[in-house]
Amino acid sequence: MSGAPGRRRPPLTLALPALVAVGFLGVPLLGVLVDAPWGELAERLTEPAITEALRLSLVVSGWALLLSLLLGVPLAWLLARTDFHGRTLVRCLVILPMVLPPTVAGVALAQGFGRRGLLGEHLERLGVTLSFTTPGAVVAATFVAMPFLVISLEGALNGIEPHFEEAAATMGAGPLRTLWLVTLPMVRPALAAGAALCWARALGEFGATITFAGNLPGTTQTLPLKVYLLLQGDPAGATAVSLLLLVVAGAVLVALRGRWIPAVR
Amino acid sequence: MFRTRAVSRSRSRSRLVARPRRALAGALLAPAVVLGLAGCGSDDSGDSEDSAGSSNGGGSEVTLTVLAAASLTDVFEEAGAAYEEENPGTTVRFSFAGSQELVAQLDGGAPADVLVTADTDTMASAAELTGEPSVIARNELTIVTPPDNPAGVDELADLADPELRLVLAAPEVPAGRYGQEILTAAGVAAEPDSLEANVRAVLGKVQLGEADAGLVYVTDATVAGDEVHVVPIPEELNVVAEYPAATLNDAEHPEEAAEFVAWLNEEAARGLLAEAGFLVP
């Protein structure tokens, strides 16, 4: 109860289920490590089909992160700082992709942005085609990943006192300048964490992509889709690629952790 | 939130809704997430699933698990219902996917009693897991387009148009291999825009209007009815897909599994298969 960070032993009733949880999360990952075709890993992962999917995955998840930052940061700020009518509804809308099965997200994207979707015709007239294209894969990844950024950023913004921003405003800083120089630096750890989660989610996106954007090597076949198809006939290859995704995602989390910990007060 | 009370038959659900409401006050990260569940999730109409899961209660029940190729989806659901009617106490549960994926699932240890694939090669690749397969149906491929045929596809050669948004099944699944065989035999250099993981996904993309054309089984086109326009493939260029069915060596109910496979070759099942557009042996 007191704030002292005691080193006392945790009660068994909590430690035991916690251990089970660790094992539950760890065993499948361990399985990938044990099952990976270590001997031929290098040649498997440098196969053109794999490097192509990896390149595409990085491009798609990178764009998804960029789009999420451009659109998601203002949205998070709006949700945290203003009290507009329908705010709850907007927040629901933001969270929905997190709880929606990604395949459903894919169907919804097709009905919204697909050729025969609500906006599809207008997009087509503007020369924008999303289905079966790399931009379509980016849209799918952004749709499911952006909420992670918005939600963690909104939480952090709610946690800081608005009077820093007010002070900046009284000193003549415009809203964008205030956001850039005052607000965002204060929430940097949460922003980094949200961005990392958002990127990792985009990298792992599968259901919405295969449903909305399709599956074509070099265009829409990202690594998770490749894993899925490799599993049909080349399970060892699928394990090798899974390992790659695991390492990439893990590396980013570790790298970002080093960055944001010094920033924590 | 007037629904919360009305749906009180599912107690756990209403509790799930009630608690986050209170937490809403401190709208930080976690409550915000839960709010999404409470606010947006209330009309997800997932109720129907509960009834499906709990329908088989009482009596000495056998649940047969049948892994079947995606193209069999509709006809097998009908056949399953007919079989259950003929054999009270037996429930037939289907899992539909691309044939290759079904075998991958079996390799991964998926428990099942019967396997039905859309080609003999895939069945042969699972030979050490299955009993002797028997062909229960045959199928052919056809071109489908959206009803208005926006790209004006009239024959196989039209599939070579690079502007055409063409969707095929991935070469990993039988429909994809058959499609490739047909295109090669016809000398059509098609550039697909997507290679779907199973043939029903190809059909779906055409039905949605996302694709201008796709290659699917004749039976898939039958299922889709008015939602697609059919452009037949000439007999001499078409391939005949064979659907072998076999019991699995690790079947939980080997006897019932064998009975089901035998039943698939009987008149009642053949009638259903023929009705769905399959060629029956």
Image (spheres, helix red, strand yellow):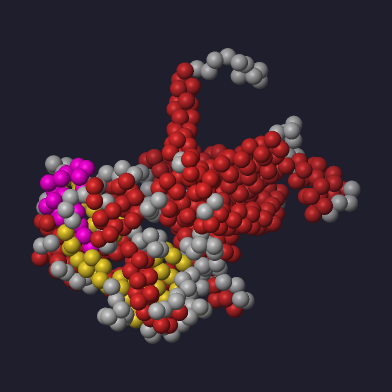
Residue at the spot 19% in from the left edge and 54% down from the top edge: B246
* Front in this rendered view, residue B180 or B108: B180
In which quadrant will I find the N terminus of chain A?
top right
Q: Position of residue A12 (x, y in %)?
A: 47, 18
Q: Was residue B247 drawn as part of the magenta stretch in this picture?
A: yes
Q: Position of residue B268 (x, y in %)?
A: 11, 64
Residue B136 placement, left or right of A195: left
Q: Position of residue B275 (x, y in %)?
A: 19, 72
Q: Is residue B97 visible?
A: no
Vertical relation: A231 (above or below) B22:
below
Count of all numbered marks drawn on residues in the image: 0
In which quadrant will I find the C terminus of chain A?
top right
Q: Which residue appears farthest toward the right when viewing the image?
A: A171
Magenta highlight range: B243-261
Residue at the spot 15% in from the left edge and 45% down from the top edge: B254
Residue B88 placement, left or right of B101: left
Residue at the spot 12% in from the left edge and 58% down from the top edge: B263
Q: Position of residue A186 (x, y in %)?
A: 76, 41
Q: Is residue B259 visible?
A: yes
* Front in this rendered view, residue B277 or B36: B277
Q: Was residue B146 drawn as part of the magenta stretch in this picture?
A: no
* Front in this rendered view, residue B269 or B170: B170
